[in-house]
Image (cartoon, rainbow, N blue to C red):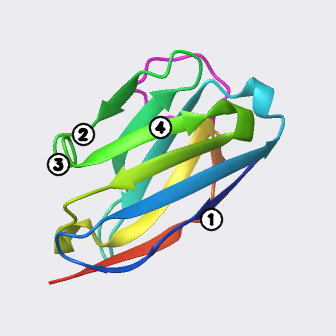
Amino acid sequence: QVQLVESGGGLVQAGGSLRLSCTASGRTFRTHRMGWFRQAPGKEREFVGAIMLSAGNTYYVDSVKGRFTISRDNAKNTVYLQMNSLKPEDTAVYYCAASSVYSTIYSQTYGFWGQGTQVTVSS
């Protein structure tokens, strides 16, 4: 199994930045792809983006493209979500996820999930 722990959430003003971290432990050698999701109150969970751990290529949904950046440090088993130019509509609980199944970077199917970290953007 793979355990994921997110950190770095908090309260920030609109236009500000936050960096979330997601550290994996356990059978991390099995993970090939990691993604970030978010869920705002009363809304469905939304896919934010993903990174392939070997090649490092990334994918972002249109709503965050150009503002958010996903990166990884394989030596630390950690993936980051750098969020810039934050907007109030980015307010949500952010989750990282990991997959041990080979698939495309666009896949939203993940087998392992973190507990989430709250991001609140004030206007």
Residue identified by numbered label 1:
115
Question: Which residue is at a point 52% across and 15% down the rendered structure image?
Answer: 55
Tell which circle, 1 or 3, labels the residue nearer the N-terminal end.
3
Question: Which residue is at a point 33% across and 30% down the rendered structure image?
Answer: 59
Tell which circle, 1 or 2, labels the residue nearer the N-terminal end.
2
- Determine which of the numbered discs, if any, sits on residue 34 in the image: none
Q: Which SS class for mark 1?
A: loop
Asked whether the beta carbons under mark 2 and mark 3 sit within 8 Å of each other, the answer is: yes
Residue identified by numbered label 2:
61
The alpha-carbon separation of the residues under discs 1 and 3 comes to 23 Å
- Specify the amino acid type for callout 3: Ser
- Specify the amino acid type for callout 2: Val
Closer to the eye: label 2 or 4: 4
The alpha-carbon separation of the residues under discs 2 and 4 comes to 15 Å
Question: Which residue is at a point 68% across and 27% down the rendered structure image?
Answer: 100
The alpha-carbon separation of the residues under discs 3 and 4 comes to 18 Å
Neighbours of disc 3 within 10 Å: few (<14), some (14-19), many (20+): few
Residue identified by numbered label 4:
71
